[in-house]
Amino acid sequence: MNRFHHVPALPIASALVAALLLTTTYAAPAQQQQPRLKVGALHVGSINDNGYNQAMHDGLVEMQANIPGIEVIEAENVPESADAERVMENMIQQGAKLVFPQSFGYLDPALNVAKRHPDVTFEHPAGYKLAGNLGTFWSDTTDWEYLAGIIAGKNTQTNKLGWVIGFPIPNILTAINAFHLGARSVNPGVTTQVIVVNTWVDAAKEAEAVNALADSGVDVVTMIVDSPAPVVQTAERRGIMSIGFHCLCAQSAAGENWLTGIGFTWGPLFTKFATDVINQRWKSENVVGNLATGSATFAPYGPRVSDDTKQLVELRKADLIAGTLQVFQGPIYDNAGNLRVAAGESLSGDDLLTNADWVVEGVSGQLN
Amino acid sequence: MSQFLFAQVQRAVSNTPLIQGLAAGAIRSATSVLYASLGEVIVERAGMVNLGLEGCMLTGACFGFVVAYRTGNPFLGLVAAAVAGGLFNLLLGYLVVTRRANQLASGLTLLFLSFGLTALVGWDYVGKKIDGLSLISVPVLSDLPWIGPVFFEGDVMSFAILPSALLVWWVLYRTRWGLAVRTVGESRVAAYAAGLNPERIQYEALVVGGLLGGLGGAHLSLAYARVWVEEMTAGRGFIAVAIVIFASWHPVRAIIGALLFGGAVAFQLQLQARNTAASPFLLDMLPYLLTLLVLLLWGRRRQYQAPEGLWEVFRGTH
């Protein structure tokens, strides 16, 4: 019978799939001279996603431009599993001495590989464990969210702001809170509505979430999902304003309704890591950038942001850097009416990013 | 103060009633899934199951976007998407019709192949901006209260939902080819005895189904999200297969299934936007619960049963 003819089909098809996946793991052309440093980087998605991964990639490109004779090996779409270990091992075999496993889920695989290769340095984003040869880095964008909130609060006509988020996790709730507090500081009547889409990567669902927000009267929308493009594009189509996140390049998806965006600028930090490795000065530590120390910035303003608003943002930014203004300055009540920060006190630091499970009064959504 | 008053006025203007937002959102979310379901109705009527439909949609979404981006013409994108979807199913046809490979395994294998293929082809196009299928407002009619924004505002593909379903119904039930497809789906032996060529008809059904599946995918990348993102179909292909069962292999009933799915997606987002207390996790299960319910209610009724040929697929005797 013909029944057994299909038997080789599966292995052959699997091999084809594997071959296709492997072709996305490519190496930069080998140089004639020995490079000063080979750097390996793993990305969980595509490096031109207009979002998280592109911001990481742009940082590596800037690092490469800053340090002559450095070579970068990048791998995209690497699953957060044992596959990541294999890709890292492969990069180390090719001579990589500095490895960036650029996704949260690579932490444990990276720690395993780091143990086997004490001569290789690892830098992991947002990690919560260190090793002798594995450091972590992140950028706390809380203050930037506050400033973005000021712009939103100044520009909204309906006094309704909207968020599209993947999941209600602590650092995102803190971002929403900071954004709302910024908006409220210039517009006491403002409310913020959050939609949880339960995915990082469903473009159509994100688009529909923006439609739903627009239907309910929201006129400024922002997001934390992998790629800001669907949200920004749909906002443009609905004629409501948008504020991007992750990558400064999100602006390319927008038009005249773009206000601004928060984007990571990893270039200087990655340059420092690479320089330290070359000069054998690298130390294992947890580096968290903030408003003053960098690693994030605003994308250029859209035409709707007035000069007055821009000036106000500069003033508040100076206050935040000087410490005369705190984002979480009491009294702050949560949206259930509980006092979260007492009058005269303020909240800051790691706790907000890792433990927050509440949203401030004026923010609503199904968040727990 | 004047700014505050102004804000109040604007707010009244921009608020859309829940029902209206829900209906418009349901149609938007349903469109891509409906085209894929219509294609799958034809395929399953011909006695096959395409579990790779998700991959067929994804291939259409990818190639449609690439061509629309490169030519600047979304309609060329639609053509490319249809061709890509058709070719995808042609490949499945070679496996399951000519080689008689297991249909379920072949479909799933092609699905995974499409993940890699579209990631590779679409690599340069992630996050690129296109104008996509334009929003059309029918003059006068779109100004009608309530129904105007729901039925007379949209893109070409959402306007064509009903005509497409009726066309597929007409083809299946009023043409010689449709009769041939249904005959093959009930019994290849009987079809052969009647002088038909079952293999050719199954190939034809697969290609037509693939055209529609590719178009469904293209609605996501050209009209709805208007971006290309890897694996952007996010399970809609499987939902389309479920809708075919829900619709008991009937193209017009597939509209109801697709709208229920689209409605469930839009409903939970609209509820969240209006801060109504309902768990989004629970609401996310709604379309699947409805499908289960229909399967339980209609599963044993003769008139709603699967084409006879499909049983062979599941028994492995095909």
Image (cartoon, rainbow, N blue to C red):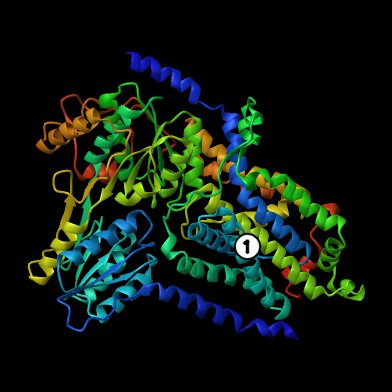
Q: Quadrant of residue B207?
A: bottom right
Evaluate whether residue B52 shows in this view. Answer: no
Question: Relative to A189, is A167 above or below?
Answer: below
Task: Report the quarter where the N terminus of chain A lies.
Answer: bottom right
Residue at label 1? B53
Seen at 7% across and 67% down, the residue is: A281
Residue placed farthest to the right in the image?
Answer: B194
Nearest the viewer among A74 and A239 is A239
For badge 1, the amino acid type reads Leu
Please state if B150 lies on the left or on the right of B300 as rendered: left
Task: Report the quarter where the C terminus of chain A lies.
Answer: top left
Question: Relative to B99, is A366 above or below?
Answer: above
Seen at 35% across and 53% down, the residue is: A51
Residue B206 lies, in percent from the top left, at: 71, 67
Could you classify mark 1 by the number of other residues whose Cα lies within 10 Å: few (under 14), some (14-19), or many (20 or more)? many
- Label 1 residue SS: helix
Please state if B40 lies on the left or on the right of A313 as rendered: right
Nearest the viewer among B273 and A214 is A214
Nearest the viewer among A18 and A33 is A33
Residue A147 lies, in percent from the top left, at: 24, 35
Question: Relative to A120, is A218 above or below?
Answer: above
Seen at 60% across and 84% down, the residue is: A8
